[in-house]
Image: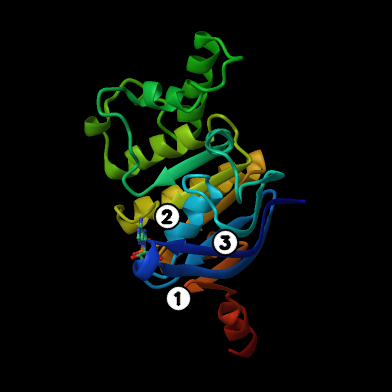
Amino acid sequence: MSVISINHLDHYFGYGQLRKQVLFKINLEIAAGEIIIMTGPSGSGKTTLLTLVGGLRSAQFGSLYVLGKELCGASAEELVQARRQNGYIFQAHNLHGSLTAVQNVKMGLELHHHLSGKEMYTRSMQMLEQVGLGNRLHYYPDQLSGGQKQRVAIARALVSRPQIVLADEPTAALDSQSGRDVVNLMQKLAKEQGCAILMVTHDHRILDIADRILQMEDGKLQEKVENLSYQWWS
Ligand SMILES: Nc1ncnc2c1ncn2[C@@H]1O[C@H](COP(=O)(O)OP(=O)(O)OP(=O)(O)O)[C@@H](O)[C@H]1O
């Protein structure tokens, strides 16, 4: 079953003479539990597509179903609801500097009103243990390394067990070992929790974790098969 279903999606920025089309007839189906990596040159439209899927900007033309809801033409309130159901992992990890690791992860549960404060704390603690930071619960972000901060961000994105995680360059600020650790962890948790991951990256060292690789070029999306054909013929 598709958790994300995109058909003939176009997107434009600007108005009048400055109006510019940045996405052209995007078609994409993502199934539950799939890990999809999107690569492509700077300015080709990757982040734009990610933000549309996340409900972080309004989809304009075509169709964009996320978890069974049409986001094209959705109201502001519907977009807020759509945003709440996803996990987000970005390059700059956006941790709150004045909150400890466990408090940051707990933020990922604040919108889940059925949980008590104690339950939220326990789940956040368990999630940090799962990402190997059980001994850093009460550290502040500036007391953690880049890789550790990114693991806190992963814990925060996954603590609510979302069906979809959107990641934009999650390894960009990390050395190659930390980057590898971070994506291995994302892959493990995604498979355990059955969540789909849509990840934008320029980091070719991590392409192997993907079930499918997509290439964005001038606002057009293509499935990449070169890697496979290379293996067949070499
Ligand atoms: N808010 C905006 N207003 C106007 N144009 C924008 C806006 N955001 C992005 N663009 C333009 O849309 C195009 C696609 O940008 P986008 O950020 O999606 O590319 P990208 O593939 O993610 O690039 P990068 O790899 O550098 O992050 C670019 O030409 C960019 O200049």
Q: What element carries label 1?
A: loop
Where does ligand 1 appear, by image quarter?
Answer: bottom left
Is 49 or 178 nearer to us in this picture? Answer: 49
Q: Mark 3 points at which residue?
A: 210
Residue type for callout 1: Asp
At x 38%, y 26%, the residue is: 104
Residue type for callout 2: Arg
Residue type for callout 3: Ala
Q: Which label sits on residue 218?
A: 1
Q: Which of marks 2 and 3 is in front?
A: 3
Task: Give the colour scheme of this rendering.
Answer: rainbow
Q: Where is residue 201 in the image (x, y as percent from the top left)?
A: 43, 61
At x 27%, y 40%, the residue is: 145
Badge 1 local density, few (<14 within 10 Å), some, or many (20+)? Answer: some
**Residue 206 visible within the image:** no
Q: In this view, does 229 lie above or below 22?
A: below
At x 65%, y 85%, the residue is: 232
Kindly indicate the quadrant of the structure image that contains residue 100.
top left
Q: Is mark 2 on a helix, strand or loop?
A: helix
* Alpha-carbon span between mark 1 and mark 3: 22 Å
Badge 2 local density, few (<14 within 10 Å), some, or many (20+)? Answer: some
Q: Position of residue 129 (x, y in %)?
A: 47, 28
